[in-house]
Image (cartoon, rainbow, N blue to C red):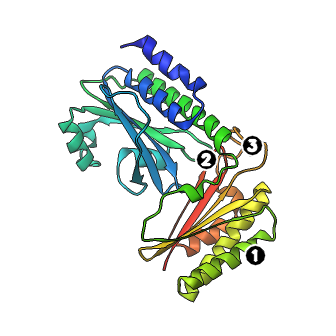
Amino acid sequence: MDVTGEADSIGSLAEANDLDSVVRHALTGLLCRPGVRRVGLALTEGGGRRLRFTARDRDGQEQAPQWCLIDAYDDVPLTCVVSTGEPIVAGVDDLDRRFRGMVAHQREQGTTALAALPLPGTGSPLGGVILFYEGAPGFGPSEQHDLAVVAAEVAAALVRVRATSQRRERVLADEPVDDQARVGDVVVEGDPRSAGVARRFLRARLGEWAVDEDVIDTAVLLLSELVTNAIIHTDNPAEIRVVLGDGELTVTVRDHGRAGDAGDAEPDGDDDPLRVHGRGLQLVEALSERWGSERDAVGTTVWFALRA
């Protein structure tokens, strides 16, 4: 084991000043652990609807991360640790029944065991890391503790660079959507009257798209609740994105937190990011087909989906 290399790589997280450099340093450091042949890192996006994933092999060249998307409902170790916040550390034989397709592929690649750990965030994980081992790794308490410490270091670095670089960026408008989907974006000001602006925007846009009136009424009600909550709790503008495609309407609201919260891992001291939203999320849960929420160092993203 190259102890010096591992320490240098993970230690350099403190010097990383953007997301890609944090990811590169994290992957390099994890690859230095004994018996590791491949590592991956995933970040939640779209309010937790999907994971953005990148990986690197032990023999691969260090380069800018190449990302792909994993649906949050796919039954793979990373989605499980992100949704539960609990690690998965086991030999592939012990995981065969639960993740049969993935295990078969990993056996062909020489993997004998894996460790998947959440990247801890405020309320819910920011994402996760996964290590693929060859040989017979020892997963004793010391190794599991070390991995958890590294995951926490990576998460802290991600919080820092996100808070620095994204605090006032519009992030929803940059998210990918299907080429065939209809999309509408708007930013509303941090003013209580903005809920009315949001309602009028959504009703007009869905009317243009010939969405059923009952669906429009439900969507407008839920959006109004989410925008009101976002403004009450942040006093800042909120982004709204509406996507219609494949018989489903998805509405997303993204706030940017209160001014001065950047980099605060627990801005309100509450480990449940949903509790503060009260009635709004109760309605979302009751009336939507699916919904989700994600909080990070920059703010909170909440989305809901309706059949349309």
Of circles 2 and 3, the one toward us is 3
Left or right of 158 on screen, residue 169: right
Circle 3 residue: 261
Circle 1 residue: 196
SS for tag 3?
loop
Relative to 246, residue 152 above or below: above
Q: Are marks 2 and 3 in contact (CB under 8 Å)?
A: no
Marks 2 and 3, how far apart at CA: 15 Å
As drawn, which residue projects farthest toward the left? 108
Q: Position of residue 92 (x, y in %)?
A: 26, 37
Q: Amino acid at mark 1?
A: Gly
Of circles 1 and 3, the one toward us is 1
Q: Amino acid at mark 3?
A: Asp
Q: Earlier in the sequence, mark 2 or mark 3?
A: 2
Q: Amino acid at mark 2?
A: Gly
Circle 2 residue: 123
The quadrant in which residue 245 appears is bottom left
Left or right of 218 on screen, residue 5: left
Q: Position of residue 290 (x, y in %)?
A: 50, 67
